Image: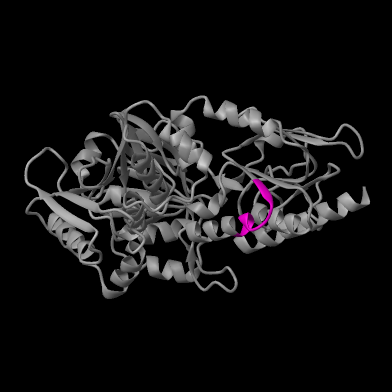
């Protein structure tokens, strides 16, 4: 099951086990059960602290296996074959059940241990989903720390009947005690905050009590990361308020144009950037989404940022790096059927539409890349492009033309998402050449029509373009003294990771220059 390279790497990790680990398997005679059987045998042979027990009876999903300690019912279970993106989740679960400590903050770990409500989490994932491991790993850790919490990570590609019965049409999707809990990427702190309802208010009060920062970075993408590092290196008091570290990079699969890094993945680059930030004295305030900016009342005064949690932060200078988000179609039915057939991540959700008819909205690079990826999984892909020609690079169009199950419709204006009340059944579009209204029957719609800047909360304060982008000059300055901006939320002409990082450095240096001159 595991090749020699993976075995060598896993063996090195398993040397960190401090107590015995028991793998209790519930298997059948099917092909996937045999794969799990081989995987567990490979793991067992790598460390003598690991034992494998195959359970013949019981109502557990098959194939699945529990990771526990002998004589202890630790509630970490995988239903499926956790390879691909989830192999790291498997390794971490083995280490944590085996006594290796987590790197999460002591306060957060203690908060998990103090949860007094029995919680059984179930997470549906796909092996190609780069968002899923964060959720799986967070919930596994909660189950390791607290005996009242259990977690089962379920491969939706294997348990498709279950996925259809529970109307799971996007991953990761999490249930708790049988009820839908959340969908999409979630970090440990975010999950704990949803469970411990008083946590957000306590954190907001703690944040509001902080002294004013010299530089406050709002946003945690590449622009924010570079700004925080450059500011901290100047030896000034630096804070970062962000809903998540990494921003859009967390939703990016392959990155091949970040100079000096031949190829990486968004989550890996995000983790590297966060580690780099933490090398410096940056006060990181996570899960904080900005709500309001109040300019300084007078020259040399303090700027205030209020967050959705109610926290209020003050700073001498502020760097806005809130990035952008997926653009919606804004047509009837889109909101109603979001995560019920309407989705924005082909890599994550594509496997849930195996053998089905789907559409991709958008003929740019993102749309055509999505169509190419989906073509290998689904029954058919229909690409709808508003313009008279595709906008994707020629190399992508050439590849698309070789795929027999892809159809391209040009001059197509999507006007409605159709459904039966529970899930998508098709879409309606207008042929822009003759205004004829047409319909396409399908079960999934992947929207890939660009980005919108996260600047709605700034309207009426900072100068914005008609597209909602923050207007900046070459130094990253906005129309407000002491307020700077960088990255995809601004009017820079190209939206790229490396450009955002450079802009963040520029904004930080400009903020420092402002501080020493005022």
Instruction: Give the quadrant of the N terminus.
Output: bottom left
What x and y, as percent, mark residue 424?
Answer: 33, 37
Above or below, comparing residue 185 to residue 50 in the picture = above
Residues shaded magenta: 276-283
What x and y, as percent, mark residue 278?
Answer: 62, 54
Q: State the residue at coordinates (66%, 58%).
A: 500
Q: State the residue at coordinates (87%, 51%).
A: 514
In terms of depth relative to the viewer, which is nearer, 141 or 407? 141
Does the image show residue 225? yes
In terms of depth relative to the viewer, which is nearer, 168 or 340? 168
Q: Identify the image's colour scheme: rainbow, by chain, secondary structure or one colour.
A: one colour
Give the left or right position of residue 353, taking residue 417 as reference.
left
What x and y, as percent, mark residue 198?
Answer: 52, 24
In terms of depth relative to the viewer, which is nearer, 380 or 11? 11
What x and y, as percent, mark residue 224?
Answer: 66, 52
Give the left or right position of residue 306, taking residue 296 as reference.
left
Does the image show residue 390? no
Magenta-drawn stretch contains 469: no
Magenta-drawn stretch contains 282: yes
Q: State the residue at coordinates (59%, 32%).
A: 203
């Amino acid at each position: 099951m595991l090749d020699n390279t993976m075995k060598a790497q896993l063996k090195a990790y398993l040397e960190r086990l401090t107590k015995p680990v028991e793998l209790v398997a519930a298997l059948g005679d099917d092909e996937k059960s045999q794969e799990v059987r081989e995987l567990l045998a490979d793991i067992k042979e790598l460390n003598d602290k690991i034992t494998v027990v195959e359970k013949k009876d019981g109502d557990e999903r098959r194939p699945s296996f529990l990771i526990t300690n002998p004589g202890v019912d630790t509630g970490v279970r995988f239903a499926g074959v956790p390879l691909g993106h989830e192999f790291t989740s498997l390794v971490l679960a083995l280490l944590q059940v085996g006594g290796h400590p987590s790197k999460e903050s002591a306060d957060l770990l203690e908060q998990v241990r103090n949860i007094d409500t029995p919680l059984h989490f179930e997470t549906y994932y796909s092996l190609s989903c780069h968002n899923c491991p964060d959720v799986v790993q967070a919930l596994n850790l909660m189950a390791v720390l607290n005996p009242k919490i259990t977690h089962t990570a379920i491969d939706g590609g294997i348990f498709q009947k279950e996925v259809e019965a529970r109307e799971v049409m996007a991953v990761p999707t999490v249930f708790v005690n049988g009820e839908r809990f959340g969908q999409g990427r979630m970090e440990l702190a975010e999950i704990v905050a949803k469970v411990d309802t008083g946590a957000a208010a306590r954190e907001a009060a703690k944040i509001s009590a902080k002294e004013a920062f010299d530089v406050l970075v709002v946003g945690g993408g590449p622009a924010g990361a570079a700004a925080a590092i450059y500011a901290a290196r100047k030896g000034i008091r630096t804070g970062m308020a962000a809903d998540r570290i990494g921003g859009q990079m967390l939703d990016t699969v392959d990155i091949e144009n970040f100079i000096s890094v031949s190829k990486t993945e968004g989550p890996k680059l995000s983790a590297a950037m966060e580690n780099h930030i933490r090398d410096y004295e940056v006060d990181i305030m996570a899960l904080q989404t900005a709500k309001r900016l109040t300019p300084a009342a007078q020259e040399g005064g303090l700027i205030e940022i209020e967050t959705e949690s109610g926290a209020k932060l003050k700073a001498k200078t502020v760097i806005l790096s809130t990035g952008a988000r997926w653009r919606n179609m804004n047509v009837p039915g889109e909101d109603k059927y979001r995560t019920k057939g309407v989705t924005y991540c082909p890599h994550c959700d594509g496997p849930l539409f195996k053998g089905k008819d789907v559409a991709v909205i958008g003929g740019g690079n993102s749309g055509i890349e999505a169509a190419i990826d989906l073509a290998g999984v689904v029954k058919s892909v229909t690409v709808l492009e508003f313009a008279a020609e595709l906008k994707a690079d020629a190399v992508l169009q050439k590849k698309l033309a070789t795929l027999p199950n892809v159809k391209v419709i040009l001059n197509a204006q999507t006007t409605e998402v159709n459904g039966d009340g529970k899930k998508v059944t098709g879409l309606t579009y207008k042929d822009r050449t003759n205004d004829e209204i047409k319909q396409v029957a399908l079960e999934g719609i992947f929207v890939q029509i660009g980005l919108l800047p996260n600047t709605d909360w700034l309207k009426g304060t900072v100068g914005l373009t008609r597209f909602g982008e923050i207007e900046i000059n070459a130094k990253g300055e906005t129309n407000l003294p002491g307020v700077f901006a960088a990255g995809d939320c601004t009017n820079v002409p190209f939206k790229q990771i490396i450009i955002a990082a450079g802009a963040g450095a520029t904004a930080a240096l400009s903020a420092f220059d402002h501080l020493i001159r005022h």
